[in-house]
Image (spheres, coloured by chain):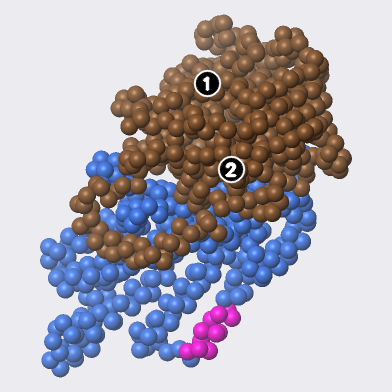
Chain colours: A brown, B blue
Amino acid sequence: MEFTTGITKFLTTGTFVKTTRAVALGVTLLAGTTALVAPTLASAEMVFHRGNGQEPGTLDPQISEGVPSSHILRDLFEGLTAEDTDGSLIPGQAESWTISEDGKTFIFKIRENAKWSNGDSVTAHDFVYAWQRAVAPSTGTAYSFLLYPLENAQAISSGEEKDLSKLGVKATDDNTLEVHLSGPAPYFLGMITHSVAYPVHKATVEAKGASWTRPENMVSNGAFKLTEWTPQSKIVSVKSDTYWNKDTVKLDKVVYYPTESQTTALKRYRAGEIDWTYEVPNDQIKWIKENMADEFHVSNYLGTYYYGFNMTKPPFNDPKLRKAFSMAIDRDILTSKIVTAGEVPAYAFVVPGVTGYDAVYSGFKAKDQAARNAEAVKLYEEAGYSKDNPLEIELRYNTSDNHKKIAIAVASMWKKTFGAKVNLVNEEWKVYLETRKLKQATQAFRAGWIGDYNDPNTFLELWLSDSGLNDTGFNSPEFDSLMKQAALEQDAGKRKELLMQAEAIFLEANAVAPIYHYVTKRMVKPYVKGWKSNVMDHIRSQYITIEK
Amino acid sequence: MLSFILKRLAGAIPTLLIIITLAFFLIRAAPGGPFDKERSVPAEVEANLNAVYHLDEPIWQQYLYYLGNIVQGDFGPSFQYRDFSVTELISAGFPVSLTLGLTAIFLAITIGMSLGAIAALKQNSAIDYAVMATAMIGITIPNFVMAPLLTLVFGVYLHILPVGGWGDGPLQALLPVIALALPQIAYIARLTRGSMIEVLRSNFVRTARAKGLPERTMLTRHAMKAAMLPVVSYLGPASAAVITGSVVIEQIFGIPGIGRYFVQGALNRDYTLVMGVVIFYGTLILSFNLIVDIIYGFLDPKVRMG
């Protein structure tokens, strides 16, 4: 077991003894030299120390689901398509592709020089194997639904269809991959940059089982290859010399550190141990802006923070009340005083700026807050409540300082505008998810959504009446029908119109009150070059250079 | 002696079984499951995941299945860290936690007892007051306050010590060990001082002095041994405190020990991982208590093991 060798070495080489001695001599050493601190100081090779959030659950591309593991997998693997520094789509393992007129058949030409890290050629069969693996029930892939646009994918995943070869993907020869979709999905090329669609090396996966992702076993096809994985400590990858585009890769090595605590990550950053943080703690933003503004990078992110209303029960089954409560939230105050990194006040659910879409906003965006409040009070009274007969509601959120601050502020806005009594209820994350899903106890509740791919569909499909994620109980046949039409529409312009109409219906119902659109916020050392912020926050280490 | 140990070991098995059973049903009684996420998966996908981990079977069947596996030494795969088995995670994390914990305990005993003894010998002097005041501060400042303070001063401002990580040299261990040991040093110093003062007034010390034993011999051979008793009985709770403390310290310093798995396992409803750590900690604490009882027997002539 490679990952334990560090520890074994630690115990056997006498480091343990040294540690004890070092501690005993602590005071002497405290006054010691800085040279000894060396793990991150300059050396001849170009190393990027990347803070990476939580410890990744897995490095198996088909099984992975968290954002932290996706950052690592983008470095280790490459799909048919990839992204440039700015996030725009470029050819990856496929050098080119053609799309049939009806938008349902894609033929990918895989590069002759696409290689696995063990020297084998990457073939179309590898993709067929990986995609079948992703939808096979026995794999236990949470993200298999991303491949549902493929013919028969859902039937296979649900066990109705047992024959994996019925999946809409075929290798016609080693370098040609044919993909059949059940409807035109314009976002398909972008979606297959997701790790679930990366190829895997069949012989390795089959021979090594669950441990194929260990450094000593893993065979990958990306710009870097895995060399070390000590859980909760670090993951190390080095430049792959078999990657087809290796000449453009400048870094020799990338070290990913699990940084669960944002505060610790910031300290390690300030101490020079990491070059890049995954996030920054909200309560430090003011200090950072005053002291390290040059190294603080904020950019728009494909996500929306919102409050949902449970539409299946009183009081929020009343559309007037939902509208009133949404209008009375002063989003400008929340984004300027509570979350202060530069989050954008939200009046839409689909993040403005999503590719191939024009933002649709709630009608009240045009009004100022005073006018909104006046109208909100009117709606509140029409719903049968008043200052003397106030509504008492629960506002529920999952335990976190940030959510609490926002909830307190929103509760006070509702109280000030309507005189409504708002009881704040917080629950631990998993308890909260269950409460929300049951739609029994919830009234108003916090939620957030990060898009899986750069297309309005990833936001709007949540609100289909049969969506498992629809915790508000929003159920509109008109919305469902527009979404269905959009899924079959081959013309990009018409599809956009359909989706925009669908969002307008959704916003009009005020099933949710969008609050702000997320931003990514991180600290980056000035010597880290070659990267650009992008809305998906897909930042591949292969473009990065360290210029100390 | 041997029959005493065997008796205690036999008593530990039902205790452990109760721990396992309670933990098993408690963690499953907690709302939410390992696969609940902000993005909940389609029903058929969730069914697939549950089937992969036997979560679709009745709970008593899962319990028996789990017990059967434990007997064979198999703690199952982790739900959260799917590339690793729980046994692998624990065996990777334990040496780290052990190094951290033992170093901290060692430091606590040596420094704590020396300080306590000095304070007792110089009772009511300036040294005594200084040691006891510092100890009081040490006890009252929890390590989740002390640890960030230490990292801020020595890592961020002075740049002389690393503020996180593990395995890149002994210096990385310095701050976490100090943060973990400080409250224990303080507590042990106070305990030693108290019991030393009492021992110094006791009859056998007077006898020893009357026999003309040199003060140093009297102190090291007789007084210290007797004064250690409360410290030894405190070692059980101290190791428990170090274990719980390391949960916090490992989190703050980003150390890959098992304490972090306990917290994350519980939050993620990683049933197998939480169970694994609970069983492991349970066994550890039961063994500690046994060891303390044995040491006690050696030190205290009044305790006889039969």
Callout in the foreground (1, 2): 2
Q: Is residue A506 visible?
A: yes
Chain letter behind tag 2: A
Residue A349 at x, y = what percent? 63, 19
Name the quadrant containing residue B132: bottom left
Helix, strand or loop at label 1? It is: loop
Query: From this viewpoint, which residue is outermost toward the bottom?
Result: B211
Q: Nearer the viewer, residue A69 or A299?
A: A69
Specify the label residue A197 is tagged with. Answer: none
Against B166, is A463 above or below? Answer: above
Type of amino acid under label 2:
Ser
Specify the label residue A86 is tagged with. Answer: 1
Name the residue that disc number 2 marks.
Answer: A117
- Whether residue B193 is in magenta: the answer is no
- The residue lying at 76 percent from left, 50 percent from top is B51
Type of amino acid under label 1:
Asp
- The residue lying at 38 percent from left, 47 percent from top is B164
